[in-house]
Image (spheres, rainbow, N blue to C red):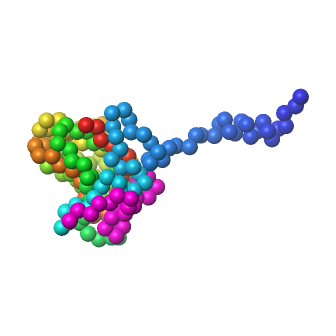
């Protein structure tokens, strides 16, 4: 019995074709971590540094599109001006490990805040001197006792003192574009 050549070709191609990669929204956090950003909307986040914090539950953008969820990422639109902040609804009071992936765009100068520390993302400068525009990086913020360690792609780039008081994890859109995905936490 002969197998038609077209059928054989289709079977071969289906075996050789790569399996589609899971989107950021579909990725499960590694063991011990839980998602802080679901990749679909801003559930668990609120506006910050405003007269009254506005819950962002079910929304896909904040501050007129300055922060916007698209295709599993949270992007900052530099065309929407303003020095604006969003933060987790949840506070972190004890030891905590936050991981995320970020991709800085043109003229990126944006920040992450946790437990009294600010981490600037400015490609080519200071702690982000090895970070290049348009390339995905992994940032880890690890608080243990009164110490905060910042790592990029597994390398320690800064260690400093953590504030004792509980805080939320805050994102600041200052200048330029950045994309963020797969924000997760281990407590």
Pinpoint residue 14: horizontal percent, then vertical percent. Answer: 68, 39
Is residue 174 rendered to the left or right of residue 163?
right
Residue 4 sits above or below residue 44 on the image: above
Q: Which residue is found at the position 33% from the left and 47% from the top?
A: 36
Q: Nearer the viewer, residue 19 or 28?
A: 28
Can residue 38 be seen from the camera position used here?
yes
Seen from the viewer's position, the closer of residues 152 and 77 is 77
Instruction: Provide residue 6's location: percent of width, then percent of height.
Output: 80, 41
The image quarter containing residue 161 is top left
Q: What percent of the width, then of the height, locates residue 167?
A: 17, 49
10 is higher (above) or lower (below) than 70: above
Closer-to-camera residue (45/145): 45
Q: Residue at x 33, y 43 (%)?
A: 184
In this orientation, which residue lies closer to the viewer: 137 or 101? 101
Residue interval drawn in magenta: 52-73
For the C terminus, the image quarter is top left
Residue drawn at x 52%, y 43% as measured from the top left: 21
Query: In the figure, is residue 47 to the left or right of 161?
Result: right
| Residue furthest to the right | 1
Q: Residue drawn 17% across and 42% down?
A: 93
Query: Could you tell me residue 171's position as x and y percent?
Result: 26, 55
Classify residue 62 by image quadrant: bottom left
Is residue 140 visible in this depiction of the protein? no
């Amino acid at each position: 019995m002969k197998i038609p050549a077209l059928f054989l070709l289709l079977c071969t191609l289906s075996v050789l074709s790569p399996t589609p990669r899971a989107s950021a929204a579909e990725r499960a956090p590694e063991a011990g971590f839980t998602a802080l950003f679901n990749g679909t909307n801003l559930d668990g986040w609120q506006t910050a540094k405003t007269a009254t914090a506005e819950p962002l539950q079910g929304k896909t953008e904040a501050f007129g599109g300055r922060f916007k969820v698209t295709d599993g990422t949270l992007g900052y639109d530099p065309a929407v001006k303003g020095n604006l902040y969003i933060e987790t609804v949840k506070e972190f009071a004890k030891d905590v490990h936050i991981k995320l992936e970020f991709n800085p765009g043109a003229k990126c100068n944006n920040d992450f805040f946790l437990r009294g520390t600010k981490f600037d993302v400015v490609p080519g400068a200071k702690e982000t001197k090895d970070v290049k525009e348009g390339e995905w990086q992994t940032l880890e913020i690890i608080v243990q006792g009164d110490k905060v360690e910042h790592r990029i792609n597994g390398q320690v780039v800064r260690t400093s003192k953590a504030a004792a008081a509980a805080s939320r994890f805050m994102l600041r859109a200052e200048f330029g574009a950045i994309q963020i995905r797969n924000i997760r936490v281990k407590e």
